[in-house]
Amino acid sequence: MNQLKFAILGLLLAIALIASPPFVQSRLRSAIRDVFTPGVSLASVTQLAASQQLRRQLLGNDAGELADQLTELRAELAEAQKQLRREQLARQQTRDEKLLALQRHDESHKPLDSPPLIVPQIVEARVIGDELAASWRGGKLLNRGTSSAVVEASFVLDANANLVDQGTDAGLSADLPVFSGSCIVGKLQHVGHWSSTWVPLTDKRFRGRAQLARLTSAGLIFATEGVLIGTGKDNCSLTKIRSTEPVSEGDEVFSLETPGGFESPLFYGTVTRAELTPGATHWDIEVRPALDPHSARYVRIIKPAVNERRMSE
C-alpha cells in the first residue's frame, strides 16, 4: 500500500515538473541532483573498489596458476628432450652395430686376394768414382788371376762408362732403371758379375719411355706418352708427343718403366720448353732432369723378383 502511495506521489511530481515553467524545472532538477549526487558518487566509488579487489584476486590466482603451469611444462620439456636424446643414441648404436655386422660379414665372405707373383726389389749401389774405377778396370783390385775365376766381365772393364758396385751377383740385368730418391738418373748398360756400367739420362745413348703429367687442384693428371732421349748436355728431349696434345712449361715427366710392378711413378724432370713450329706434327719439348745424374754417389736399382710369399703357399 505504501509503495502504491509513493508511486502515485512520484507520478504527480513528475506531472507537476513537466507542467511547471522552465526556470522552475531547472531549479527542481538541481535540487534533485544535489540530493542524489552523494549517493551516486558513493555507489561509484564502492563499485570501483569492489571491481579492483575482484580483479586483484582473479589476477593473483591466475598468475600463480600460470607460474605453476610453466614450471610443469619446463620439466616435461626437459624430460622429453632427455628421452629424445636417449632414443637417438639408441638408434645410433643400433646403426653402428648393424654396420659392424655387415663389415664383419663382408670380411668373412671376401675372397682372399692372392699376392702378386712378381714384386719389385730394390738393390742399393754405390757409384764408383773415376780413380777407383780406373784401378778396377786396370785389374789392380783383382789380382788373383783367371784361374781363381775372379775376373770381371771384359765388356764392363773395357767400357769407358760410369760404374756401380753391383752386378749379376745381386740379380741385376741390363736396362734396369737407376734412381736416386724417387728420381731416375739413368739405366744400367752392361752388367758384370760384381759391377755394372750405367748411362745417365742426359747421355745421348739414353732412351726411356715417359709420360707427361700436369699438376692440378684435383691432383696429378697423367696425359700422353712419349720417349725421353738424352741430348749429351745437361738436359733431355721428350719426343713423339703429337701436336694435338696440350703441353706447357712446368708439366712433369715420369717414367713408364716400372720393373716388377713398382707402383710409385719414378720422376724424370720438368718441361722447361715446349715449342710447336708451323706445320709440325709433333712438339719440340725440352726437359730438365730433377737431379743431376753426374752428382749421384749412392743410387738404387729396381729389379723384378719372385714373391717369396707365393713360393711358400
Image (tube, helix red, strand yellow):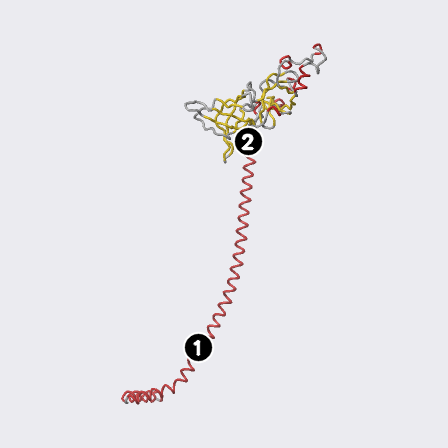
Query: In the rendered image, which quarter contains the N terminus?
Result: bottom left
Q: Residue furthest front?
A: 233
Q: State left or right for residue 171 relative to residue 9.
A: right
Q: Amino acid at mark 1?
A: Leu
Above or below, 34 against 206 in this view is below
Q: Residues within 10 Å of mark 2 (few under 14, many from 20)?
A: few
Image coordinates for residue 136, horizontal then vertical, percent: 68, 16
Image coordinates for residue 102, horizontal then vertical, percent: 54, 37
Q: Do residues under tags 2 and 1 come within 8 Å of each other at their CB atoms?
A: no
- Residue at image position (55%, 31%) is 110
> What element does badge 1 sit on?
helix
Question: Circle 1 sits on which residue?
Answer: 48
Q: State left or right for residue 273 relative to residue 303.
A: left
Image coordinates for residue 8, horizontal then vertical, percent: 31, 88
Nearer to the camera, 120 or 278: 278
User: Marks 2 and 1, Cα distance to the nearest angstrom?
Assistant: 90 Å
Image coordinates for residue 211, horizontal then vertical, percent: 51, 26
Q: Residue furthest right?
A: 144
Question: Circle 2 sits on which residue?
Answer: 110
> What element does badge 2 sit on?
loop
First along the sequence among labels 2 and 1: 1
Q: Amino acid at mark 2?
A: Lys
- Residue at image position (54%, 45%) is 92
